[in-house]
Amino acid sequence: MKILAFDTCLDKTYITLSEDSKIIESKIILSNSENYHSAYLISTIVEILKSNKIEPKDIDMIATDIGPGSFTGIRACTTVARVLAQQLDIKAVGVSSLEILSKILEGNDLVALDARKNKAYIFDGKILGAVELEEVDKIVKGRRVISDNSLYARLKENADEVISYQQNEYPLGEILAKLALEKTETDWRKLKPLYIQPPPVFGK
């Protein structure tokens, strides 16, 4: 099964082409002074398919990060995933960024990401929602935690170990592609953004 996986929800764009559990090609794209990284999603997908002599019709499944993360990034990758899956009449799978990050050290680590408003998105085998930081301090006590730069210093005060995914290069696209093989919901019509908190309203 050929899987095209992509993620524009986090701090970079991750795009991976794989066949079953074998990675064919994987790319990471940074933002630049002119464009946010998600602006390069479509052009990079086309480039990867062409360089590997694969036609869109050869893809069996689309996998994408559904959030939480950048609201613009979530909308970008879920929209592209739905359109591609519909046009190609293939499967589409959504995976939470929290679940992806929990696997970066090949374990099942606790994940705590900045949710703003004095809260953190928590994943501990399942999504626990947006939790007040005072409660997060208790949850992370004595644990190894995957987090981001925003919460790194605070979590270090209570956690046994804190790793910010933003301080190293991790193969998040490859992890996404592998997790997609484990999912049972593959109908593109049911693929939706994961908004744990409501998107911001313009002017508020």
Image (spheres, rainbow, N blue to C red):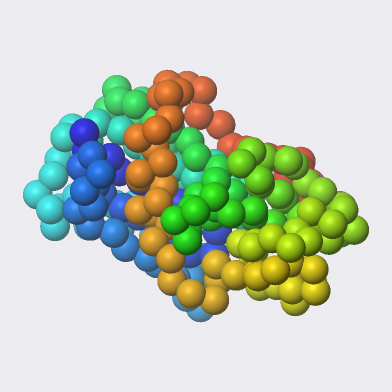
105 shown above or below 189: below
Q: Looking at this view, is 160 or 183 the one in front? A: 160
Q: Is residue 77 left or right of residue 138?
A: left
The location of residue 144, given as percent across then percent down, is 64, 63
Residue that lies at the very extreme toward the left in this rendered image: 53
Could you tell me which residue is drawn at 54 percent across and 76 percent down?
Answer: 167
Q: Quadrant of the N terminus?
A: top left
The location of residue 72, given as percent across then percent down, is 59, 52
Number of numbered discs present?
A: 0
Residue 3 makes an appearance in the image: yes
Could you tell me which residue is drawn at 79 percent across and 53 percent down?
Answer: 139
Q: Looking at this view, is 78 or 100 the one in front? A: 100
Q: Is residue 45 left or right of residue 109?
A: left
Q: Is residue 125 left or right of residue 115?
A: left
Could you tell me which residue is drawn at 65 percent across and 70 percent down?
Answer: 161
The location of residue 80, given as percent across then percent down, is 42, 40
Q: Is residue 112 left or right of residue 167?
A: right
Residue that lies at the very extreme toward the front in this rendered image: 142
43 shown above or below 56: below
Which quadrant of the structure image shows residue 195? top right
Could you tell me which residue is drawn at 23 percent across and 57 percent down?
Answer: 25
The location of residue 114, given as percent across then percent down, is 73, 60
Residue 9 makes an appearance in the image: no
161 shown above or below 181: below
Which quadrant of the structure image shows residue 90? top left
